[in-house]
Image (spheres, rainbow, N blue to C red):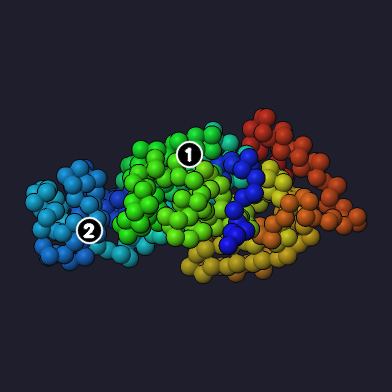
Amino acid sequence: MVDGNLPFDLHDERPLRSLFLDLNAYFASVEQQERPELRGVPIGVVPVMADSSFIIAASYEAKHFGVKTGTQIGEAKNLCPDIVLVDGRHSLYAHYHRKVVEAAETVLPIDKVCSIDEMRFCLMGAERRPENARAIAIRMKEVIRDRVGESMRCSIGIAPNAFLAKLGTDLEKPDGLVVIESRELPNRLRGLSVTEFAGINKRMQARLQAAGIFTSDDMVAADQALLRRAFGSIIGERWWYLLRGYDIEQPETHRKSLGHSHVLAPELRTDQGCKEVLLRLAVKASARLRANDLWTRAVTLQVKGARSWTARRRVVPTQDSVSITETLLSLWEDRNFVGPKAVGITFDELSTAEQVTPSLFDFKLDRALLNKAVDRVNAKFGKNSIYLAAIQ
């Protein structure tokens, strides 16, 4: 059996492609954010107030005493006599989840929401440079703290694939930031329990131990054939590549869209405010297209509010700020929303330059050099040193 997703060239470049965010002690943190008197106090979120029930989330103050998710309430009281038990409020946690998503997307578009407290992001172009990726992570932490609440801490992992990025979030908690570069692999993974890897439960651990794999050191030392036998399938061979930073976990999920969104400040929750912010987002997103050498065939606008509005139009392949702004203004004529709270612009049906066959009669292509010159000026002298008159 041959897995077509496995890389043929073991010298492939393995840049930082994935950023993974894990909200720390999420349910407990939400309760501490909502109730300041609980901050710094050991708390356990519970489904029902009965000693026979279980803790569904523990604050880090409670974890210090050995209380964790799944601990029986009676045992939790013995471990931590001062623990404060709080009834779970799932509607509140869903509300905070939406706030976190909105905040995070002002920094980077979400690739996938993995759970109520986990999400992953794709890094593109210059975002993959370690210093830039780290700056994005720090900014994301700041935005969540400022827009959602000071008790809402998160751990962020950055790595060549989503598997290792998720692992990174577990290596440093709470409020961690771990960057795993390909040059460190696989040695960076030594010294761990195999159950620290996502997907290894107790049953799989027993199978690995039967094959002589007890720790992460054994895992990274194993060759492809041994891992294949230990896992009992081609999955073991895929793990060999994952542990070395190859991006093969979900090859079908390479980013197919790019965009930016923004939660509106109260003074901008007007028709004109929405338009002004969208124009700025369009310029920002089109510059990001060019930075990543991508072209879009479709533009989507969205305004979220009491009554939301979405409009989409397919376009001739472009990365030009002017033509994208013209499309935005044309779509804007048919807007129909009430009570706006957030806006966004998305480009999809993306292509690289090699995949685009431009029309010889499309005058918009003549602006390509101008766009790149503007990008260079703004990169050197600061954002918006030169900008379209439409966003004045």
- Pick the front one: 8 or 336: 8
What is the secondary structure assignment of the residue under circle 2?
A: loop
On screen, 388 above or below 343? above
Q: Position of residue 199 (x, y in %)?
A: 40, 56
Q: Position of residue 134 (x, y in %)?
A: 50, 37
Q: Position of residue 235 (x, y in %)?
A: 49, 58
Q: Position of residue 111 (x, y in %)?
A: 54, 55
Which image quarter: residue 203? bottom left
Between circles 1 and 2, the one closer to the viewer is 1
Q: Residue at x 16, y 44 (%)?
A: 65
- Pick the front one: 210 or 346: 210
Badge 1: residue crowd in 10 Å (few <14, some 14–19, many ≥20): many
Q: Residue at x 53, y 44 (%)?
A: 245
Which label was assigned to residue 186?
1
Q: Residue at x 42, y 55 (%)?
A: 230
Residue that badge 2 annotates: 70
Quadrant, the N terminus? bottom right
Q: Amino acid at mark 1?
A: Pro
What is the secondary structure assignment of the residue under circle 1?
A: loop
Which label was assigned to residue 12?
none
On screen, 251 above or below 178? below
